[in-house]
Image: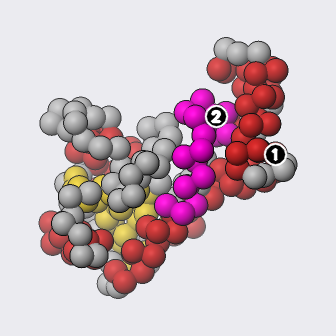
């Protein structure tokens, strides 16, 4: 869920210290950088996201900027690990090359895929993700969960069983989702959930 603060919390995950510093500088944009946080690898990123020691008091990120450094697999492994966390923040991938299978990562839920050679587009990519997810602030955690399950293709009965509520409750959540998001159809809810990176198109 996006934070309610005006300054978004951003987690940079990169095992290359120089690249992590350059990414941080590209995102500072005249601020003191207190909302920018660095994890050195996937293990540290997972501890941060799960608020495990030493990150028990860490803020929940609004966006993750994840560094890929081919031919090392650490970035790819970190992406797969982050995907195991339900409702994880959207991930923008920064790669040293376009040799990675870009479509695979976009279909697997990445919000964007950029190259590290030119970080000028990074601020815009972050703002685009935040703008797309801003309407989620109007929803309760349960409504976000219902939206995600709808986008995964579950029927009302299946969602009711998953959440242990009645079908009428699910229908009420769906109607409220449409009202709060200004979306009139289930197909529209699915399209929005995909754009907001709540679900992925599929795994290879």
Contact check, label 1 and label 2, Cβ < 8 Å: no
In the foreground, 81 or 4 = 4
Mark 1 or mark 2, which is nearer to you?
A: 2
On residue 186, the disc is 1
Q: Position of residue 25 (x, y in %)?
A: 22, 74
Q: Which residues are magenta?
A: 130-148
On residue 122, the disc is none
In the foreground, 108 or 148 = 148
Query: How would you classify the magenta stretch by its main secondary structure?
Result: helix
Disc nearer the start of the sequence (1/2): 2
Label 1 crowd (10 A; few <14 / some 14-19 / many >=20): some
In the foreground, 149 or 167 = 167
Residue 199 is a magenta residue: no
Q: Residue at x 35, y 59 (%)?
A: 7
Q: SS for tag 1?
A: helix
Q: Position of residue 80 (x, y in %)?
A: 42, 48
In the shown orientation, is residue 119 left or right of residue 52? right
Q: Is residue 63 above or below residue 83?
A: below
On residue 143, the disc is 2
In the shown orientation, is residue 80 left or right of residue 185? left
């Amino acid at each position: 869920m996006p934070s309610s603060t005006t300054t978004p919390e951003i987690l940079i995950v990169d095992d290359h210290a120089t690249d992590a510093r350059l990414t941080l500088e590209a995102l500072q944009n005249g601020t003191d950088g207190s909302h920018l946080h660095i994890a050195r690898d996937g293990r540290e990123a997972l501890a941060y996201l799960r608020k495990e020691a030493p990150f028990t008091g860490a803020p929940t990120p609004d966006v993750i900027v994840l560094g890929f450094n081919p031919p090392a697999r650490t970035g790819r492994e970190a992406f797969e690990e982050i995907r195991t966390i339900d409702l994880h923040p959207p991930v923008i991938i920064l790669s040293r090359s376009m040799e990675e299978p870009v479509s695979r990562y976009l279909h697997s839920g990445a919000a964007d895929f950029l190259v590290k050679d030119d970080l000028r587009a990074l601020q815009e990519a972050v703002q685009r993700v935040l703008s797309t997810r801003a309407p989620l602030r109007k929803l309760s955690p349960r409504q976000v969960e219902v939206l995600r399950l709808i986008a995964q293709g579950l029927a009302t009965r299946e969602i009711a069983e998953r959440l242990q509520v009645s079908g009428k409750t699910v229908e009420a959540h769906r109607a409220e989702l449409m009202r709060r998001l200004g979306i009139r159809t289930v197909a529209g809810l699915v399209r929005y959930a995909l754009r907001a990176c709540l679900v992925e198109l599929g795994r290879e």
